Image (cartoon, rainbow, N blue to C red):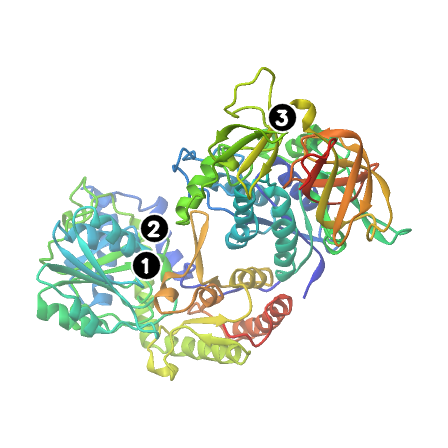
């Protein structure tokens, strides 16, 4: 049976070039990058090279790049590392739980957080951020592209606000990296987090941009690695992989790949929306008004259980994810969709299709064969009468 | 879209359902076109009331829906190489099982959530879910036998080979449609045989102890649960204190609340007496609990409603059956008669002890389940407690 993977926002496979680039670093060039001898030097060279690639990618200095274990660590570092008791923190209600739960935790040490809500379209209004600023505000954290809807936030405008008000600005670019160009100078952020496995590098590695002079305390202590910003022996092979993946991502952003992916996504979306009782989460009347990552479409389907549709599609070879996530055995509807004002029923009946940049027309064709049939089947079983409003 | 040969196995993480998955997965080579999918129904969040009013914090293993049990079920599916999904039906479970459970207690009845769960979740919802993902049939680890009888043109439900594990009492509500789409592979096996199959299939949980309690009440103390649940819901625990009376109506004491009692209960009556006293009857409207001697506990008849018939289409004339009034009860001979719309009266040959409103009455003809219903009232020998 054909399998089509449309859950890129959950994770991505290594690209062959990434795998190849990493290969020597498991057994041949296995040294500890901190060691003085040849083996250490080889490892150090590889890490430095990757660092420079990341610096190009972010448009910053190599010294401002910090390698770590991934997006969660980056998000946690920005929050735990910068905020002190009495500080005020501004973020949004559509952030990833790595930000939201860190905010919950710093509440224990006397940090108050304002969670700015999105508009129904999924976009954050920068004015809402401005309005939330107080004398004690120390940090703003806003994601670049939302993982569930793909909606791209107006980070440059927020960067200006941060500059004007003297507040630190962190961007969770875990989903945006590789899909949307990043220029930290243009945006004006102080910190930015990315994750390897969302961009064809391995799981367990990521990186941060930390603007020189930003007083962010290290989350992990125990060595002077990464200029004392992140202790722990470098995951050399992972970092090499991240470097290579970043190099490839830079190409993809410039060579029309994203435009091609956008066309595939648009075709998929348009066809599915021809089914009655469907709509896009992350649209604003005229869908073009809301900027979105090229690969993502989040669609609600009335009169069916989203969970059942995800499973039915999986059994037919199509991998997507639903509007709910399983946390500790309980299923909650997506906090992002709820924050956008979607009611619980529709949130639970929403599916996210996120294409790999290697997706093909044949992939889209297959998904379009499978989805309408599955939707119709589920609706025929539903006790809810057709035509009932969602 | 429905592949009739795909079977969804309801997996709880226990030995029984895991063995069912092993039997079906191993028995399918793909050549016959039958494929197996494992499903766990997530019905209750074990962490929800944990720690409140004495409810245990960490549920023991062997409790449906705990993370440990989901883990066990998933590992079995991984070992067998079958697709596995956890499907969430917490809302429906709360609405159709937990809430009625609470309401029954507060109305002085002794409920059996397991039968409701079977009716609404395990066999209705699960079948729906199975169909929606393309599985035409389900399989469960219940000890029961179902087969189609051509002569009568009906699906028949029968007691299993392992009588000690007989779960047909909880399955009386199954419709013909549900029975036609369900497999009970363990019906002709004994528990020791099931464990042996589990071992031979390489299942690590072959020795896992069986879960014995109501799945959403860790620790088994339903009073703690009621208190914690109502508090969480922001509802007042109803005041149902009232009189303790003897069977002749004489008031002999007071009690703190009708939910503390169940018919046949001996302990906790708070009344001194030369001979043992038992709860005979609970009157929710007047908050009155009637107690009496052991001999008075016996009822000759019961009324049951909300009936479901399995081996017969309906009851049109008196029928001799063996009736079971509790899970742990030896079926007793009785004559069953229709008694109005959706009601029957069962008259026992011998008076039966502690017939309890809220429990099910299930009627057997030999090994076959004729049908059953919910006990509405009991009429004792001396007709003193007719409701």
Image location (x, y in percent) of residue B239: 45, 41
Which dot, 2 or 1, sits closer to the camera?
1
Could you tell me which quadrant the C terminus of chain B lies in? top right
Label 1 belongs to which residue? A96
Q: Is residue A166 above or below residue B356?
A: below
Of residue B57 and residue B271, the one placed in the foreground of this image is: B271
Q: How far across and down, in percent of the image, does residue B224 sit?
A: 45, 36
Q: Which mark is residue A204?
A: 2
Residue drawn at x 42%, y 64% is: A8
Q: CA distance from mark 2 to mark 1?
A: 17 Å
| SS at badge 3 | strand
Image position of B318 (left or right of B63): right
Element at badge 1? Answer: loop
**Residue A382 x %, y %:** 61, 66
Q: Quadrant of the N terminus of chain B?
A: bottom right
Res. B292 mark = 3
């Amino acid at each position: 049976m054909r399998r089509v993977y449309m859950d890129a926002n959950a994770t991505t496979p290594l690209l062959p070039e990434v795998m190849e680039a990493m290969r020597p670093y498991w057994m041949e060039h296995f040294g500890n990058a901190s060691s003085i001898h040849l083996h250490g030097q080889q490892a150090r060279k590889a890490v430095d090279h990757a660092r420079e690639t990341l610096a190009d990618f972010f448009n910053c200095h190599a010294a401002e790049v910090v390698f770590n274990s991934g997006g969660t660590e980056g998000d946690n570092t920005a929050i735990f590392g910068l905020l002190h008791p009495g500080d005020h923190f501004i973020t949004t209600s559509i952030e990833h739980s790595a930000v939201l739960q860190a905010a919950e935790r710093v509440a224990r040490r006397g940090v108050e957080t304002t969670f700015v809500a999105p508009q129904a379209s999924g976009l954050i209004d920068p004015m809402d951020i401005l309005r939330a600023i107080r004398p004690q505000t120390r940090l703003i954290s806003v994601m670049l592209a939302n993982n569930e809807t793909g909606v791209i936030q107006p980070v440059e405008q927020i960067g200006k606000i941060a500059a004007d008000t003297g507040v630190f600005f962190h961007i969770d670019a875990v989903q945006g990296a590789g899909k949307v160009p990043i220029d930290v100078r243009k945006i004006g952020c102080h910190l930015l987090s990315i994750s390897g496995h969302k961009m064809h590098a391995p799981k367990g590695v990521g990186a941060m941009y930390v603007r020189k002079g930003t007083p962010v305390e290290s989350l992990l202590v125990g060595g002077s690695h990464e200029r004392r910003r992140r202790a722990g022996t470098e995951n050399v092979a992972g970092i090499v992989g991240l470097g290579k993946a970043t190099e490839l991502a830079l190409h993809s952003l410039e060579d029309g790949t994203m435009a091609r992916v956008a066309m595939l996504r648009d075709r998929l979306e348009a066809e599915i929306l021809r089914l009655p009782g469907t709509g896009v989460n992350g649209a604003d009347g005229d869908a073009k008004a809301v900027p979105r990552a090229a690969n993502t479409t989040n669609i609600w389907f009335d009169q069916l259980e989203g969970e059942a549709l995800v499973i039915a599609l999986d059994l037919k070879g199509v991998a997507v994810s639903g509007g709910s996530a399983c946390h500790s055995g309980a299923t909650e509807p997506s906090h992002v969709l709820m924050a956008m004002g979607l009611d619980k029923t529709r949130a639970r009946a929403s599916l996210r299709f996120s294409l790999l940049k290697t997706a093909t027309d044949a992939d889209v064709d297959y998904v379009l064969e499978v989805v309408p049939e599955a939707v119709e089947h589920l609706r025929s079983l539903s006790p809810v009468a057709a035509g009932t409003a969602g | 879209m429905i592949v009739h040969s795909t079977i969804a196995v309801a997996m709880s993480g226990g030995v029984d359902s895991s063995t069912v998955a092993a039997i079906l997965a191993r028995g399918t080579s793909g050549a016959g076109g039958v494929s197996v999918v494992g499903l766990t129904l997530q019905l209750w969040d074990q962490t929800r009331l944990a720690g409140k009013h004495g409810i245990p914090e960490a549920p023991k293993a062997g409790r449906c829906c705990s993370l440990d049990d989901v883990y066990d079920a998933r590992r079995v599916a991984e070992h067998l190489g079958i697709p596995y999904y956890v499907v969430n039906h917490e809302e429906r479970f709360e609405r159709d099982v937990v809430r009625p459970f609470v309401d029954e207690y507060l109305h002085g009845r002794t409920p059996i959530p397991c039968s409701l769960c079977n009716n609404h979740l395990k066999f209705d919802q699960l079948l729906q879910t199975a169909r929606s993902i393309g599985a035409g049939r389900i399989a469960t680890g219940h000890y029961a036998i179902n087969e189609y009888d051509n002569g009568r043109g009906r699906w028949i439900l029968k007691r299993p080979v392992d009588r000690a594990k007989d779960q047909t009492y909880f399955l009386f509500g199954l419709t013909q449609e549900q029975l036609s789409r369900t497999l009970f592979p363990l019906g002709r096996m004994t528990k020791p045989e099931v464990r042996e199959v589990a071992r031979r299939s390489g299942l690590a949980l072959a020795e896992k102890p069986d879960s014995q309690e109501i799945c959403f009440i860790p620790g088994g103390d339903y009073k703690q649960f009621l208190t914690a649940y109502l508090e969480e819901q922001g509802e007042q625990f109803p005041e149902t204190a009232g009189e303790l009376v003897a069977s002749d109506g004489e008031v002999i004491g007071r009690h703190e609340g009708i939910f503390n009692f169940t018919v046949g209960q001996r302990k906790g009556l708070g009344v001194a007496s030369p001979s043992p006293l038992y709860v005979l009857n609970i009157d929710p409207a007047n908050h009155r609990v009637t107690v009496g001697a052991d001999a008075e506990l016996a009822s000759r008849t019961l009324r049951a409603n909300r009936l479901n018939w399995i081996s017969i289409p309906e009851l049109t004339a008196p029928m001799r059956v063996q009736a079971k009034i509790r899970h742990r009860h030896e079926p007793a001979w009785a004559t069953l008669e229709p008694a109005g719309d959706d009601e029957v009266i069962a008259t026992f040959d011998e008076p039966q002890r502690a017939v309890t409103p809220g429990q099910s009455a299930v009627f057997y003809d030999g090994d076959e389940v004729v049908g059953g219903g919910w006990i509405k009232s009991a009429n004792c020998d001396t007709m003193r407690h007719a409701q």
